[in-house]
């Protein structure tokens, strides 16, 4: 810690101290400490290093199964807690049209809900509304249900399952006033089919909010984008191999698929993307209406 210039050493007195201006970055309390939590991404990525190397072999697997990423839920849960700071996600509550939809909704769904941090806060603030969350990772859903129970939330249901199959459930057809997902679409084998499925579960006047990595579709346009090297690395270690791991065809978009490609695919799926806005350091929210 001393040679990394995190902790300072008083060599004359053989003591150590942490300068006040560095304490905030190392604190992992809600609303603080993003740099400290981000460092936990090193073991998160390293967990699948050997599996990734196997994919590069000529007869190696095409991808890495989601079941290999056991550190996903706790890592993303920590990152969400830092960003949210105990408040419902601002990309939903700060945008008046979406906030009004939640207030008048009969059902709202978070696809790829993870550990349920965002959804539980929203369900807490709107106790009379119905909320659903679905995720593929069992340990994430276990954490989500535990969180909802500890918050005594009775208006939220968490489902364990594949997002694509859930969108085909008969009782989900035209069910939701609002569907949203965060950092999910680029991980899917066939995001084009997923987006069309989202349209099917939305009511005719429903809204879809897609939050994804703020990037461009052309590599040249990302060279000077903040955190590009981190995001491309994360994409190589998680997004692309996870997308390729399933059976059948995969588009393997990766995290840096870019806003240009995203807008094109949303339009092809039958959505009118009427507004985009950047949030946090590297997120962009796409606000969409379902076209009839």
Image (cartoon, rainbow, N blue to C red):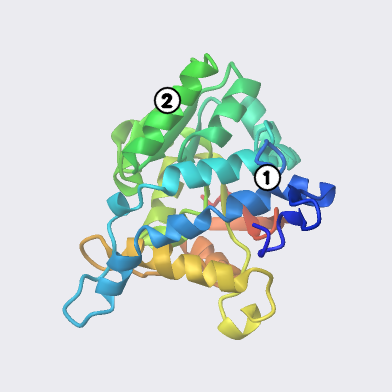
Instruction: Give the residue displayed 63% in from the left and 31% down from the top.
Output: 102
Judged from this view, the residue extending furthest toward the bottom is 220
> Which residue is at 50% across, 34% downward?
116
| Dots 2, 1 in contact, CB < 8 A | no
Give residue 250's position: percent from left, percent from top: 31, 68
Q: Position of residue 230 (x, y in %)?
A: 57, 68
Q: Nearer the viewer, residue 30 or 209?
A: 30
Q: Residues within 10 Å of mark 1 (few under 14, many from 20)?
A: many
Label 2 or label 1, whichever comes before in sequence order: 1
Q: Of residues 195 and 145, which is closer to you in this image?
A: 145
Residue 131 versus residue 75: which sits nearer the camera? Answer: 75
Q: Tell me if residue 172 can be seen.
A: no
- Residue under pointer 1: 91
**In the depicted structure, whether residue 162 falls above or below residue 29:** below
- Give the structural element (helix, strand or loop) at label 2: helix
Which residue of the protein is positioned furthest toward the left in this rendering?
59
Compared with 245, 178 (above or below) is above
Residue occupying the point 68% across, 74% down? 225
Instruction: Specify the quadrant of the image occupied by residue 105.
Output: top right
> Are there few (<14), some (14-19), or many (20+) residues within 10 Å of tag 2?
some
209 relative to 186, above or below: above
The secondary structure type at the circle numbered 1 is helix
Q: Residue 197: x and y, percent?
A: 39, 50
Which residue is found at the position 41% from the left and 61% from the top? 46
How far is the residue under mark 2 from the one under mark 1? Answer: 23 Å
User: Is residue 260 found left or right of 185 in the rendered image?
Assistant: right
- Of circles 2 and 1, the one toward us is 2
Query: Which image quarter: residue 231?
Result: bottom right
Report the residue marked by disc 2: 145
Residue 175 image position (x, y, % from top left)? 44, 33
């Amino acid at each position: 810690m001393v040679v990394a210039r995190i902790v300072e050493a008083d060599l004359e007195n053989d003591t150590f101290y942490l300068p006040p201006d560095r304490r905030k970055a190392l604190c992992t309390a809600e609303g603080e400490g993003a740099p400290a939590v981000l460092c936990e991404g090193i073991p998160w990525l390293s967990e699948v290093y050997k599996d990734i190397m196997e994919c590069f072999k000529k007869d190696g697997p095409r991808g890495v199964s989601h079941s290999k990423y056991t550190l996903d839920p706790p890592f993303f849960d920590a990152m969400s807690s830092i960003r949210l700071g105990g408040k419902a996600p601002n990309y939903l509550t700060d945008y008046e049209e979406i906030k009004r939809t939640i207030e008048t909704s009969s059902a709202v769904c978070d696809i790829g809900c993870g550990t349920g941090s965002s959804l539980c806060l929203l369900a807490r603030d709107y106790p009379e509304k119905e909320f659903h969350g679905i995720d593929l990772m069992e340990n994430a859903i276990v954490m989500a249900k535990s969180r909802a129970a500890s918050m005594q939330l009775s208006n939220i249901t968490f489902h364990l399952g594949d997002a694509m199959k859930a969108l085909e459930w008969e009782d989900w057809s035209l069910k939701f006033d609002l569907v949203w997902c965060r950092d999910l679409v680029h991980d899917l084998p066939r995001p084009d089919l997923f987006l069309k499925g989202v349209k099917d579960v939305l009511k005719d006047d429903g809204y879809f909010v897609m939050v994804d990595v703020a990037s461009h579709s052309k590599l040249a346009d990302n060279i000077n984008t903040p955190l590009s090297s981190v995001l491309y690395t994360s994409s190589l270690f998680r997004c692309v191999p996870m997308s390729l791991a399933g059976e059948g065809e995969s588009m393997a978009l990766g995290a840096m698929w870019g806003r240009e490609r995203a807008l094109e695919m949303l339009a092809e799926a039958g959505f009118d993307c009427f507004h985009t806005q950047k949030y946090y350091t590297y997120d962009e929210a796409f606000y969409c209406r379902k076209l009839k």
